[in-house]
Image (cartoon, coloured by chain):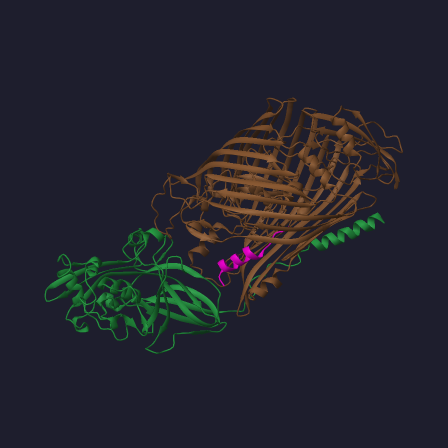
Chain colours: A green, B brown
Amino acid sequence: MKWSMALLSCIVCAAAIAPSSCLPADTRPAPARIDVSVSGSPLVTSGIASDAMTDGWSVSFDRVLVSLGNASVDGDACTNYSEADYRRIFDASIVQPKKLATLYGLGTCGFVFREINPSLDSVLSDGVSNAEMTTMITPGHDQYTDAAKQGDTGITVWFRGNAQKAGVTKTFDWSYRLRRVFVRDCVASHGASPLRLSLQGGDTLALDIELHPEVLFHDRLDPITAQLRFQPFADADDEFGNKDGAVTLDELGNMTLENAGVSVADITIDDAAVSNITTFEDFVYLGLFPQIARLAGTAACTIEVKDFRED
Amino acid sequence: MTIVAVTALLALAVTRRSTAQAPATSANVSASVSASANVTGSASATNGLVPPRLLSSPAVEYPVDANGDAVVVLLVTVDDKGAVESVAAVKGEDPFAAAAISAAKTWKFTPAFKDGKPIRSKTRFSVGFTAPKIEPAPIASPSASTSAAPATGGPPKVPSAEVVIEGTKLPPTVTSLSKVEVRELPGAFGDPFRAIEILPGVTPIVSGLPFFYVRGAPPGNVGYFLDGVRVPYLYHVGLGPSVIHPGMVDRVDLYPGGYPARFGRFAGGIVSGETAEPRHDFHGEGNIRLFDAGALVESGFADGKGSILLGGRYSYTALIVSLIAKDVQLDYRDFQARITYDVTDKDRLTAFSFGAYDLLGQKQNGILNILFGAEFYRLDLRWDHTFAKNTVMRYAVTLGWDQTHIADQRNATDKSLGSRLELSHEISKRTTFRAGVDFVLDAYQAALPTYADPENPDTQRFAALFPPRNDLAGGVWSDFVFKPDDNVEITPGVRADFFKSGTATKQAVDPRLSMRFKVSKDVSIIHAYGLAHQPPSFFVPVPGLAPGSLGHGLQTAFQTSAGVEVSLPWEVTGTVTGFHNAFFGMTDAIGSSNRGFDAALEDIRASGRAFGGELFLRKRLTKNLGGFLSYTISRSTRTLDGRTYPATFDRTHVASLAVAYDLGRKWRIGTRFVFYTGAPKVVQQHGLLAPPPTLSPDRDPAFYRVDLRLEKRWNFGEKMWLSFVVEFLNATLHKEVVQGQEIGPVTIPSIGVEGGF
């Protein structure tokens, strides 16, 4: 009797020992794969000829470096399989597509990526040196970064070059430090539906993000109707700055929108007005800089600049 | 819904188990614990004779009008039904003898058996009285290893048997909480493991989150053990109830430093739970709460030679949560099973298995994404053998299986095989020799992500830090408990460990020394020194996940402390302790870095130190009015790349005050006040080259919370009871600021009904 009880006890115990359930392995259905790349602009090498500008200036670029990352698919009808929440620094002079991330997802998905300041573990794309990365990850701030709240930030877009007209040369060396800039819902034209990806299991898609350094010289925020000009930048140095030939962001800040020839209508994109733009520097920094990257085949994207605690 | 939102929901939704209650006899037990009277023991028998066994914990009230320590030897006559027939003191004087006799008359036994038939027997008990001190007297309970001890009173005269019960004294460096005490502690929800946060030297990371820094050492450096078996985590879904049924845990000991030599491979502290001794009467307890239900039953078999215990908890949170957020899945459960069998009067075999399972997920478009998942299972097979008087041995083999869900919907697992041999030999009344050998083999395997960008630096760092491998750790240890006289106890010890991880090997030798000097009737001085080594660890313990960076060296801690124990009026005991810990090669990535969780996957090695003072006042909660007051002032720093700065979770002041009061008519109310100052405010650098940290940074605001507990109990007959318990952690709904961000309020309400027999 006692041994039968012991045996029964052992059986009960063994049953209890056997895990009633285990954590599931990855049983999700096969997703689609999205290879996301970034292409530079031929304008970085060739420059912008004077006949492409409305005011006779021509523009040459010395260096345009852009830090992008955190590419993802999202949406209510979308299942995102993986996070590619890392960052790469791109040399905008290299036109051939270079990898940004590999994504996996299923369903009908939107696509979003971030213009984001580099981190210590940023991956350097072709043409970017370690010294340049060191410069870009060195903390700093400007009037648009809230150092008190979020600390100093690195450089998201580093933009250097010059413009010439009638023997006059103006140089620029601008750093864009906002780091929570989300780019999404790119459209091909006004009124078009935002790009949506239909992701089926086993499919492989390729998405390319183009860099457009010329957007900094747009005369309005609507990239579809905007034209290129440099004269307000030259004026910033000549009339509102120190006339040293170097156009600084601070000098742009000395100009009103009216000084720069920007009207209220020019700071409106479709039906969304960009707020907090009162100076020419605001117009360039908050309105134009974020437009430097957009999906290939599209004309404009929705830009979201979030508070440092938002994601 | 984001992870944060789900976590917040969890914090609101998960209630805690109110404690398991002892049966009616627990009132005696708790009272006696407060008086620090010890009775533990061993039984004797000869062939064909099974000695009587205690069914209740034989605790004895320390006499109110007594002073000092004393020993009383009782001769208890137990009839053939297990009732106490008579009690006589054969040694000892009043008032101790009277107290012991009075208590012994209430004890319950299984009768002695001769050739399978119950018989009348005589049992000899040695009852030790110790004047109230800081460490709680362990609730008297015959230990497995000693309950089959041979007779010491000569050959038994059938039909009577003679049994001697002897005590086990806790080491000087430990602070211990008994189940009975914890049951009354507001905000602990009856979980002994949870209650350690009230102890001095314990610094919380975030209120309600059961991960603690212990004297400056991060949670990953604190080892959790249950009956000597390593336990990977203690709480369901991080915040939830304990993974071990509280009814199983007899007491929890915290060794903040200078711990005994048998504890190794952890450089920050030891939390050791001891399960209750097997009982042979059929008993059980259970509870039903809003979110889960648990039960534990135990019974003897084979005429008292064996016992079987089954326990567990099952949550029906999936149902509840689905009403709030239909896409969220929250599931947790645990089990405990234990069988003991006395093969002979000198040999006991035990199979003890326990485990836990946690899953928090969110369905999206019909696909379940697991946000948190963890599970572990243990099977511990023990053989306890008594060689001769005062010489006992335990040999155990432990099988383990741990698994955690990690990023990209994959799992990390650890299959472990461990073995330990422990020997205790009382050379003389004043000298005990203890020694042991143990090893554990861990096979770590983290599944590769099926769908992930292989160039993601996080993926690469993870693969580098947690490679699939086999780790081996083995050690040998020994110590002496030496009491040259009644006022001095010295325990020198040493352990040597060998570590192998992949191809890397390391060795360590850890000397330990603890001393207690009784300088007067009410005052003792305690010293503890110890060296402790540990292989690389993650900043919090995660099942199945351990860094494979042994090649970069072991973590090392040199722990020192000195304190004074004082017995105060009104049965209050107090300790004041100063400590200093020096750390070397610590893998405290979070505590050492100002890059937050970005650094979690890096093998950051920092040195550091922690020093401070601790105050602990204790009036046992089991009295009509009882409470704890604990206060720690400390400073914890890290030194990395030549810079020294406060550790990320350094808190200068940590205080807790807990009070419980018996309102009468079986109503009991309690409250706890927790206060701590803010941790250094870390300016997140978001992966940038950080400026040098400062030694005097701004700090987050201080935090406090108030916990409440209310219980009404009904007793039915001698053994049955029912309780209604309402408990609230952070009843004031205070929010906490962590790293500049306000979180919470993290609050855990609990309402439930418990019962037992």
Name the chief secondary structure element in magenta: helix
Residue B735 appears at what percent x and percent y?
48, 51
Q: Nearer the viewer, residue A209 or A181?
A: A181
Question: Residue, x 85% and y 28% (percent of image)?
Answer: B155
Residue A65 appears at what percent x and percent y?
29, 60
> Which span of residues is magenta-colored?
B1-17
Examine the rendered structure and indicate whether residue A94 appears above or below residue B381: below
Task: Decide if residue B554 is in sight here.
Answer: no
Looking at the image, residue A2 sits to the left or right of residue B470; the answer is right
Residue A304 appears at what percent x and percent y?
36, 65
Examine the rendered structure and indicate whether residue A230 appears above or below residue B146: below
Residue B348, quarter of picture: top right
Q: Which quadrant of the rendered structure holds the C terminus of chain A?
A: bottom left
Q: Nearer the viewer, residue B342 or A152?
A: A152
Residue A228, quarter of picture: bottom left
Task: Decide if residue B366 is in sight here.
Answer: yes
Q: Nearer the viewer, residue A186 or B648?
A: B648
